[in-house]
């Protein structure tokens, strides 16, 4: 395989042998690739390849580990503080959620968009929830917040519903159900999530919890390193 000028985002890198590095890229056309960059630690080349850089990648190789022949960064997302922790969270979802060579152009576009919004200082929580929902939908784990999974009826904004993993929304009536479950909310909350309207803080909190539950089968149950490193950040 020889690929030229792939749109690529640097996800992660680590030293490899004496002067090389293993670099993980997320490309628009060929998905996630891991490649060897030779001589990366010579001179100033290390500084030219870092996470959150977007650019053009050329590489070669039959399968698995590829050889990077050229990478030219065209954009570097400048993230600091909480935005940096949110950015690492996004990259970790990509690294754990996508198999190598799994092309997901819509996910790539969503990743670039959320990183740009973080760099621009936009409110983080709504952008992260939107990215999670896009990732889930594109990878076949999307949640349907519009219908009762048992009756097929449209969600009633004034009704109360329980979210059941791998099944969906089920209407509940007893007051006890609403008090004892963190996955029970009024229908208006689910309708707002379906409309991608995160202007209400309660909607954001519900979306965060539901997305985390839905992401578990995709990324596994092991704790996210980005959350452990930045445990003070409640946005992710």
Image: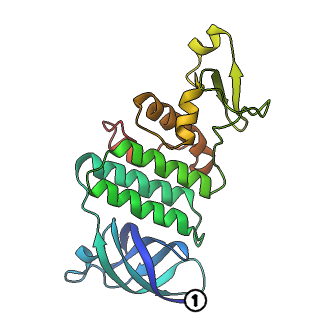
User: What residue is at 47 percent from the left and 86 percent from the top?
Assistant: 59
In the image, residue 149 sits, relative to residue 186, either above or below, namely below
In the image, residue 37 sits, relative to residue 234, either above or below, namely below
Residue 12 placement, left or right of 82:
right
Q: Nearer the viewer, residue 167 or 144?
A: 144
Split into 4 quadrants, where in the image is the N terminus? bottom right
Q: Nearer the viewer, residue 234 or 221?
A: 234
Where residue 65 appears, as percent x and y from the top left, is: 53, 78
Q: Quadrant of residue 45?
A: bottom left
User: What residue is at 30 percent from the left and 78 percent from the top?
Assistant: 74
- Which residue ends up furthest to the left in the rendered image? 43
Where residue 16 appears, as percent x and y from the top left, is: 38, 74
Counting every numbered tag in the picture gives: 1
- Whether residue 212 is visible to the viewer of this picture, yes or no, is no
Q: Quadrant of residue 195?
A: top right
- Whether residue 179 is visible to the viewer of this picture, yes or no, is yes
- Which residue ends up furthest to the top in the rendered image? 175
Residue 131 placement, left or right of 121:
right
Q: Secondary structure at mark 1?
A: loop
Where residue 140 appears, as percent x and y from the top left, is: 66, 54
- The residue carrying mark 1 is 1
Sort mark 1 into few (<14), some (14-19) or many (20+) by Cα contacts within 10 Å: few
In the image, residue 108 sits, relative to residue 191, either above or below, namely below
User: What residue is at 57 percent from the left and 45 percent from the top?
Assistant: 215
Where residue 43 appears, as percent x and y from the top left, is: 19, 83
């Amino acid at each position: 395989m020889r690929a030229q000028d792939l749109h690529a985002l640097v996800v992660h890198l680590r030293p490899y042998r004496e002067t090389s590095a293993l670099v993980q890229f997320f490309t628009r056309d060929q998905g996630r690739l891991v490649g060897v960059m030779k001589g990366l630690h010579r001179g100033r080349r290390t500084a030219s390849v870092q996470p959150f850089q977007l650019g053009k990648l050329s590489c070669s190789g039959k399968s698995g580990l590829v050889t990077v022949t050229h990478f030219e960064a065209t954009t570097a997302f400048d993230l600091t503080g909480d935005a940096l922790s949110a950015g690492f969270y996004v990259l970790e979802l990509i690294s754990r959620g996508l198999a190598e060579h799994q092309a997901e152009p819509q996910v790539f576009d969503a990743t670039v968009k959320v990183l740009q919004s973080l760099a621009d200082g936009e409110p983080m929580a709504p952008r992260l929830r939107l990215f999670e929902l896009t990732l889930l939908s594109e990878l076949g784990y999307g949640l349907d917040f519009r219908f009762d999974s048992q009756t097929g009826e449209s969600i009633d904004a004034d009704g109360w519903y329980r979210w059941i993993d791998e099944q969906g929304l089920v209407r509940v009536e007893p007051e006890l159900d609403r008090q004892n479950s963190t996955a029970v909310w009024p229908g208006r909350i689910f309708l707002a999530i379906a409309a991608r309207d995160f202007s209400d803080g309660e909607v954001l909190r519900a979306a965060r919890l539901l997305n985390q539950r839905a992401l578990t089968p995709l990324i596994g149950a092991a704790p996210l390193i980005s959350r452990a490193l930045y445990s003070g950040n409640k946005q992710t």
